[in-house]
Image: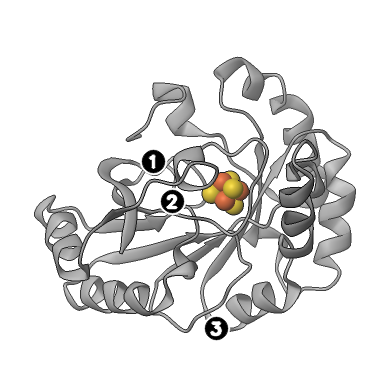
């Protein structure tokens, strides 16, 4: 598998926030968010190679129950991803897959953590990628397929309070409970995130969505391996 890093940290976002977890970060992405917080998997993708069984051994050697497969976009590598999930679940791990929800494959996982990208993510300064990104970033049929077959959370990164309009429009096409929807502030710095907390909390109260901080940034700022 192409990957960029394997590390042990705390889950920083979503329903399992704070959970000690081993992270397997696949490399390469089919989107190009202009604010991507892992550009080493998207804009300048690293492409170390590891066999699935070596990945399983490295992950398992940490002796940690929760495993998070993240990216990049893990579903770009469907076949090895499916084997990786099978092997981890056979060893009793809890498996979360974090995805931009544009590609589907029937892999085994306990939680699919989808993060569909809103219009503010489009890289307007790069016309070629802006077009590709805009055409790909929302795949409603893929999101609904995950919702139908898995335990899911839907995480949205908001840049401004107006982003809620796009989210509300998107949700009219999906069968999902409000408590499965999680709102998070866009930002890679503590102050940027802090500046968005109050209006984000009010939106969560108004619509019954869940609020998620970004714990890894609160604890370690914008560092790799966290
Ligand atoms: S989907 Fe995720 S990994 Fe891909 S460009 Fe956007 S933020 Fe980066």
Residue lying furthest front: 128
Q: Is residue 158 visible?
A: yes
Residue 7 in which image quadrant? top left
Q: In the image, 8: left or right of 4?
A: left
Q: Residue at x 81, y 65 (%)?
A: 171
**Above or below for 120 versus 102:** above
Query: What is the x, y in percent for residue 178?
Result: 72, 60
What colour-coding does the image apply?
Answer: one colour
Q: In the image, 163: left or right of 145?
A: right
| Element class at badge 3 | helix
Picture disc at residue 207:
none
Q: Residue at x 64, y 48 (%)?
A: 32
Q: In the image, 160: left or right of 79?
A: right
**Above or below for 31 versus 222:** below
Picture disc at residue 16:
2
| Element class at badge 2 | loop
- Number of dots carrying numbers: 3
Picture disc at residue 18:
1
Residue at which label 3 appears: 149
Q: Is residue 38 visible?
A: no
- Of residues 128 and 143, the one nearer the viewer is 128
| Element class at badge 1 | loop
Asked if marks 1 and 2 touch (Cβ < 8 Å), the reply is: yes
Distance CA(mark 3)–CA(mark 1): 26 Å
- Of residues 23 and 134, the one nearer the viewer is 134
């Amino acid at each position: 598998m192409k990957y960029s890093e394997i590390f042990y940290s705390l889950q920083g976002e979503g329903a399992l926030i704070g959970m000690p977890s081993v992270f397997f970060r696949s490399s390469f992405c089919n989107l190009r968010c202009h604010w991507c917080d892992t550009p080493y998997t998207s804009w300048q993708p690293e492409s170390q190679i590891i066999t699935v069984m070596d990945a399983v051994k490295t992950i398992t050697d940490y002796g940690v129950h929760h495993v998070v497969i993240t990216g990049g976009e893990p579903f770009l590598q469907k076949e090895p991803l499916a084997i990786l999930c099978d092997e981890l679940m056979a060893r009793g791990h809890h498996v979360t897959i974090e995805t931009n929800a544009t590609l589907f494959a029937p892999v085994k996982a306990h939680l699919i953590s989808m993060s569909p990208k809103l219009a503010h993510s489009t890289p307007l300064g790069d016309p070629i990628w802006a077009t590709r990104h805009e055409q790909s970033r929302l795949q409603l049929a893929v999101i609904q397929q995950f919702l139908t077959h898995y335990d899911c959370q839907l995480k949205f990164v908001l840049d401004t309070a107006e982003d809620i309009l796009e989210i509300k429009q998107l949700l009219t096409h999906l069968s999902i409970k409000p408590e499965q929807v999680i709102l998070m502030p866009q930002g890679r710095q503590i102050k940027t995130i802090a500046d968005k907390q109050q209006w984000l909390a009010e939106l969560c109260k108004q619509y019954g969505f869940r609020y998620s901080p970004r714990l890894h940034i609160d604890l370690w700022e914008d560092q790799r391996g966290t």
